[in-house]
Image (spheres, helix red, strand yellow):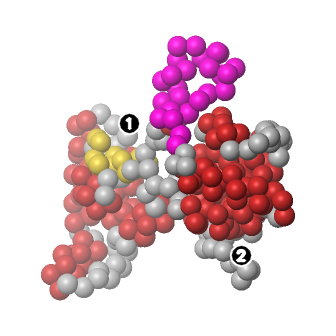
Amino acid sequence: MTRQNDDTPPGFPARRAALRLLDAVLRRGETLDNAIHAACQGMREGADRALARALVGEALRWQADLDALIDSATREILPEDAKPRAVLRLMLAGWLRLETPPHAVIATGLPLLAGGPRRLAHGVFSALSRGGAQLPEVPTLPRDAAQRWGERAGPIAAGIAALPPLDLTLKEAGDWAQELGGTAIMPGHVRLPRGAAVDGLAATLAAKSPAVMKLGRDSFYAVWDMAAPQALTHLQAMLTLTAQTEDAAEGPAAFAAKRRPQWRNR
């Protein structure tokens, strides 16, 4: 996690960045991609940046429904641009969409506010969490968007609710699918479920022979535009070349000796 002061709870920097990012999108009209660098400035951990983006993404997708929950728990409707509303959107998105425990949501969300607004947000979130608040199966679209899309509004809303998985293009989909915990959807492609840790994937890939990985990558792109017979001939030649590398012999030797392989990249 990103380094922080001793008086801030773990996870707070990601929430602080998420609040900046949400403000940039809703108040200044920036896109997530354009605003995330400035919002997350000073954060060195990719996991913190990913969490901030995930929180804002969910808050934006479900904004109408989150606002409806907030308004149901307040005596007076909060202004659209009120900071407590923005913080509550993020807190509810973390609880209802990212499945963060309520106590963790409170510990990391309330420090974004002070005084009366903090007490207000605490009261609203506690009332909703104790009351078992829920979101609908699909997000409510803004009225102008629903009218513009007409009959397509329903399928579009359903698509927004079901976030896409992570698809990878690899040399051997079948072998990698089992190792990475995914599904081989076609030759050379592995589909991982939403939430797959990219850092973990990078570590898994980094543990492989660099020489073999490079040969596999180069082969994949080399045959992309080839006719099938030509591609097969090329792949056979590359497999022969791969089998002649020192790393190709090191893999089975390490497995037989029950030790970690010592790749030499040749």
Q: Residue at x 77, y 60 (%)?
A: 119
As helix, strand or loop, the secondary structure at mark 1 comes to: loop
Report the residue at 55% width, 45% height from top.
Answer: 133
Tell me which residue sits at (46%, 61%) in the image. Answer: 197
Frontmost residue, 180 versus 229: 180
Q: Which residue is mark 2?
A: 8
Dominant SS of magenta comes to helix
Residue 225's tag is: 1
Say which quadrant the N terminus sits in. bottom right
Task: Look at the image and say whether residue 143 sits in the magenta stretch.
Answer: yes
Is residue 27 visible in the rendered image? The answer is: no
The reply, left or right, for residue 68 in relation to residue 84 is left
Q: Is residue 112 left or right of residue 154?
A: right
Is residue 221 depicted above or below 51 in this figure? above
Q: Choose top left, top right, bottom left or bottom right for residue 7.
A: bottom right
Mark 1, other Cα within 10 Å: few <14 / some 14–19 / many ≥20: few
Q: Residue at x 29, y 49 (%)?
A: 183
Q: Residue 151's x, y, as percent?
A: 52, 13
Pick out the residue farthest to the left: 256
Q: The magenta stretch spans which residues? A: 134-160
In the rendered image, residue 42, in percent from the top left (x then y), is placed at 74, 69
Vertical placement of residue 85 versus 122, above or below = above
As drawn, 85 above or below 37: above
**Amino acid beneath label 2:** Thr
Dot label at residue 23: none
Name the image quarter holding residue 13: bottom right
Which amino acid lies under the numbered mark 1 shown in the image of this protein?
Answer: Asp
> Picture coordinates of residue 96 (x, y %)?
54, 49
Q: Which callout, 2 or 1, points at the residue further toward the start of the chain?
A: 2
Q: Quadrant of the C terminus?
A: bottom left
Query: In the rendered view, would you say 30 is above or below 13?
Result: above
